[in-house]
Amino acid sequence: MALDIIAFGINHKSASVDLRGRVSFAPETVVETLRSALPSLGISEIAILSTCNRTEIYAVGELSDGQLLDWLAATKQLDRSALENCYYCYRNTDAIRHMICVASGLDSLVVGEPQIFGQIKSAYSVAQKAETVFGQLNMAFQWSFAVAKRVRSETAIGQNPVSVAYASVSLAEQIFSDLKTAHVLLIGAGETIELVARYLRDKQIGQITVANRTLERAKELAEDFSAEAILLADMPEHLHNADIVISSTASQLPVLGKGAVEAALKKRMHKPMFMVDVAVPRDIEPQVEDLDDVYLYTVDDLEEVIQDNLKARQSAANLAQKIVDEEVEKWSSKQRELSVVDTIKAFRDSAEAIRDAEVEKALAALERGQDSSEVINALARNLTNKLLHKPTTKLKQAGETGCDDTINVTHALFDLDKKP
């Protein structure tokens, strides 16, 4: 019998940015976490999706909500009570629906944002590397990816770029009337920062500096956007030049502290700085927000900025939801079909075992010189009796208990003519 498919986690709708940061998994720890989770939780498959807006565990097994809460709290060294009021847990068809909505961008902070599709595919690839996804969960991922692609191709949900990166640039454009004279410092060199750089270039930003942990990756990104590349360690020397700072790294600790910003403000003669921290955990110390002349926004603050963009996608999202409903029903039908296949196999195996035993007895009788006609008749009689014994017994019990459904199903199953 198939085990439960489970989708469990927290996201931007249910938990604060600080809690999401405490629950997030660093990329380098995921493989080990996946492998240790199988025996720890007593499950057969698992994958982890961890982004700035969500941390979700997809699993196959028999698990209660409490077991998942205990495991996540223990793994992240949190008090379980911190998670009890902000988690969600979906099972089977509801889990598939959730996975599809996540992959399609329908459950994102910005509806239809494209990055999540790559992130969930990456989570799947990491689980494959860890050898913790292969059966039911593998099928669930593949189904989700196929539906997400269908949503993208059949609706306008992916048109008109709307994302956290886009919202960051839109907010900067509102604050700076002319971006052509502004200098932006981008911290990190991942997908989000690359998107930010692309949007800034489209807005004809004045100057871009890219700071990253490795200079090589910073240079790769900088070359594409005619930008300057520096190391994170060298940021204090360049920070005062930045009118805009947008940060998105995978660091587990802040990369920009209050002291460095204070020093930069002094050099700028307290000319205001606009900062957007879209990382989870935070890249910029929260105390920076206390400084005069600094306007610091986090991913949660961006939600208000992007509400207008959601309206443009609502009709597309409604159409996408119809596609999701259709595909979830197809999934359910497929699972029922697979369940019937298992039943048919078990039925055939049982019948074939009876057949093989009776054929063996018949062959032995022929070897002993018994009349062939008698052997064939005995074989046919024994097969009929043994194949019909259990169904006949069940039908008699159904008649005694008044279980008409069983009797009616038997008539339909064997195409029997009902007699008055």
Image (cartoon, grey):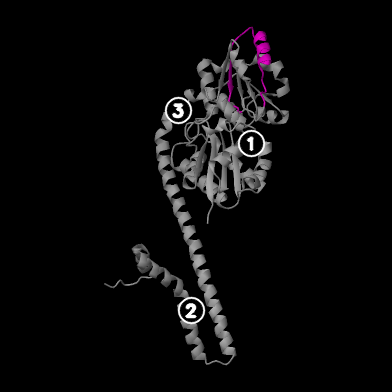
Mark 2 and mark 1 lie on one chain; the one further toward the N terminus is 1
**Cα–Cα gap, marks 2 and 1:** 58 Å
Q: Does the segment drawn in magenta span residue 268? A: yes
**Mark 2 belongs to which amino acid?**
Leu
Badge 3: how crowded within 10 Å, few (<14), some, or many (20+)? some
| Residue 4 at x, y percent in the picture | 53, 49
Q: Which secondary structure lies at badge 3?
A: helix
Mark 3 and mark 2 lie on one chain; the one further toward the N terminus is 3
Magenta span: 253-280
**Cα–Cα gap, marks 3 and 2:** 70 Å
Q: Which residue is drawn at 66% across and 20% down?
A: 256
**Cα–Cα gap, marks 3 and 1:** 39 Å
Q: Which secondary structure lies at badge 2?
A: helix
| Residue wearing tag 2 | 383
- Please tell me whether mark 3 or mark 1 is closer to you in this view: 1
| Residue wearing tag 1 | 74
Q: Does the segment drawn in magenta span residue 260? A: yes
| Residue 109 at x, y percent in the picture | 50, 31
Is 398 in front, or is 4?
A: 398
| Residue 320 at x, y percent in the picture | 43, 40
The quarter holding residue 184 reads: top right
Dot 2 and dot 1 residues touching (CB under 8 Å) = no
Q: Which secondary structure lies at badge 1?
A: helix
| Residue wearing tag 3 | 309
Q: Residue at x 70, y 23 (%)?
A: 232
**Mark 1 belongs to which amino acid?**
Ala
**Mark 3 belongs to which amino acid?**
Asn
